[in-house]
Amino acid sequence: MGNRPLNIDIFGTVRYHAKPAIGSGQIQRPAFVTTLVPRGFHRAMSGMNRSSFLPLFSIIIIIKLGIGLLPSFTTAVDDGQFVFNGFLNSSLTVDGAAMVLPGGLLQLTNGTGMVKGHAFHPTPFRFRESPGTTLHSFSVSIVFGIMSAYREVGTDGMAFLVTPSSNFSEANAAQHLGLFDYKNNGNMSNHVFAVEIDTVRNNEFMDIDSNHIGIDISDLRSVNSSSAGYYDDNTGGFQNLSLISGEAIQIGLIMTQGQCGLM
């Protein structure tokens, strides 16, 4: 069975569900609060050869970010806001298997086993004015799609993160998501805040299931996680959502001075 072709047209308008699907909680781990000037925003993804198939994980991201929870988004960067509607001419810094396809998709892995890919925003963002001052609030919205050869089986997933370094050359693929390795996972000196989009249950990281979103602070053992889904706008009921369906999925993240919420 071959991989389904990628087409930017399949990622159209995505409904935004304004009710939080994971809740909120205090972020108190020192790695995040001591990150002063992050190098950039990073999307990381890894693939792994499982049995007789090599699934293609590909992603389109339409990303909006605003420092200070400003009410609207523009394409400017100097005021702490940016938006990507496709990635042609975006000047992203990519490594590993990551590449921007001719149609504007950002593809992070290519179907080869045990690979990783990273993409960084080209300019850094300042999250506090000086050491010891209050962290700026920020919000981000990402639209992505995970394309796998089989709808029921995927590999380990991807992550969005804030990091002071763009060098992840020593990080492992597979369950480490291209973020850490066996030695430094859990080391607070990593200074990494990540939102993992995890599609495999790894007992070593105490994953809750094989289809969840988690908040990671320099450690793949999430400080908070929830099965992927959303709250129906009409009924208010929670609806499960497959992360490897190949459909466009939107995730919203709001960070307000230590409070983290996912939508």
Image: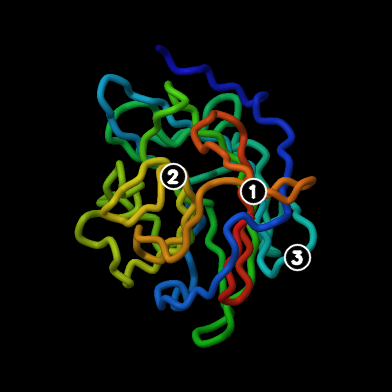
Q: Residues within 10 Å of mark 3 (few under 14, many from 20)?
A: few
Labels 2 and 3: the sequence-earlier one: 3
Indicate which disc, 1 or 3, sits on the residue closer to the N terminus.
Answer: 3
Tell me the amino acid under the disc marked 3. Answer: Leu
Residue lying at the far left of the rendered structure: 183
Given residues 129 and 209, the one toward you in this image is: 209
Residue drawn at x 71%, y 66% is 69
Residue designated by label 3 = 70
Number of the label disc, if any, that sits on residue 130: none
Specify the amino acid type for callout 1: Phe
Position above or below: 200 against 42: above
Q: CA distance from mark 2 to mark 1?
A: 23 Å
Against 51, residue 38 (above or below) is: below
- Residue 227 at x, y percent in the picture: 50, 49
The three-letter code of the residue at mark 2 reads Met
Which residue is painted at 34% across and 66% down in the image?
190
**Foreground residue among 223 and 80:** 223
Q: Which residue is mark 1?
A: 238
Which SS class for mark 3?
loop
Q: Which mark is residue 158?
A: 2
Please, which colouring scheme is shown? rainbow
Q: Of residues 86 and 254, which is closer to you in this image? A: 254
Number of marks: 3
| Side of 261 relative to 99 (left or right) | right
Q: Which one is closest to the eye, mark 2 or mark 1?
A: 1
- Tell me: residue 78, above or below residue 63: below
Residue located 50% across and 58% down the image: 40
